[in-house]
Image: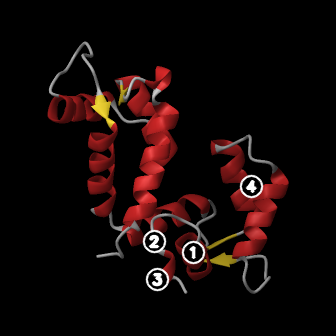
Amino acid sequence: MAELLDPSALRKHCTDAFQNADSHRKGFLTKEDYKVAIMELLGYKPSKYELESIWTEHVGCHGEEEGGLDREAFTALITHRLMQKDIDELVRQIFVSFDVYLNGFLTLESCQRVFHEVAPLIKTDQIERWFREMDIDNDGRVTYRDFELMIKSHTLLYPSHLTK
């Protein structure tokens, strides 16, 4: 099993995402608000099935909304979910998604291609800076090991003391 997430950092990120998504400062997330919070935290839009399952289990209703998911319930749900993830597998999946030519390493070109497809607003100079930071030996290639070290040292998924 991979290292555990840093609980205090995770709580802070959950709180921030909750506050950003809580439209009209109601003190709870509607289904639409929840989608926004999940996009911010995990980078994907939850399916209708996932949303209905969560609402039925954690809010106690389905169909038309009556209330929503409060901050404590949201934080507990996300914390539980992320603590069970195999972080090493997640890093491998991210690496493979950037390795568009399937050659076992990343190039600046492959990184730019992925970013322009999935995050077109990220500027080219930001992508280049990120790539240079990962390319430890300056050979124009980022190996899986380089990528893994970078991800582990720059994400809430790993406590900072584990990467030093």
Q: Amino acid at mark 4?
A: Gln
Residue 44 appears in view? no
Label ID, residue 112: 4
Give residue 5's position: percent from left, percent from top.
38, 67
Residue 3 appears in view? yes
Q: Please report whichever mark, 4 or 3, sits nearer to the chain's N-terminal start.
A: 4
Residue tagged 3: 162
Label ID, residue 158: 2
Distance from label 4 to label 3 (Cα)? Answer: 29 Å
Q: State yes or no: discs 2 and 1 in contact (Cβ < 8 Å).
A: yes
Distance from label 2 to label 1 (Cα)? Answer: 7 Å
Distance from label 2 to label 3 (Cα)? Answer: 7 Å
Badge 2: few (under 14), some or many (20 or more) residues near its Cα, within 10 Å? Answer: many
* Secondary element at image label 4: helix
Question: Which quadrant of the figure contains the C terminus?
Answer: bottom right
Label ID, residue 83: none
* Secondary element at image label 1: helix
Question: Which quadrant of the figure contains the N terminus?
Answer: bottom left
Q: Amino acid at mark 3?
A: Leu
Q: Residue at x 47, y 68 (%)?
A: 92
Q: Is residue 126 left or right of residue 106?
A: right
Foreground tag (2 vs 4): 2
Q: Please report whichever mark, 2 or 4, sits nearer to the chain's N-terminal start.
A: 4
Q: Residue at x 42, y 32 (%)?
A: 35
Front residue of 43 and 94: 43
> Is the residue 64 above or below the residue 23 in the image?
above
Residue tagged 1: 153
Give residue 97's position: percent from left, percent from top.
55, 58
Q: Please report whichever mark, 2 or 1, sits nearer to the chain's N-terminal start.
A: 1
Distance from label 1 to label 4 (Cα)? Answer: 21 Å
Q: Residue at x 29, y 32 (%)?
A: 69
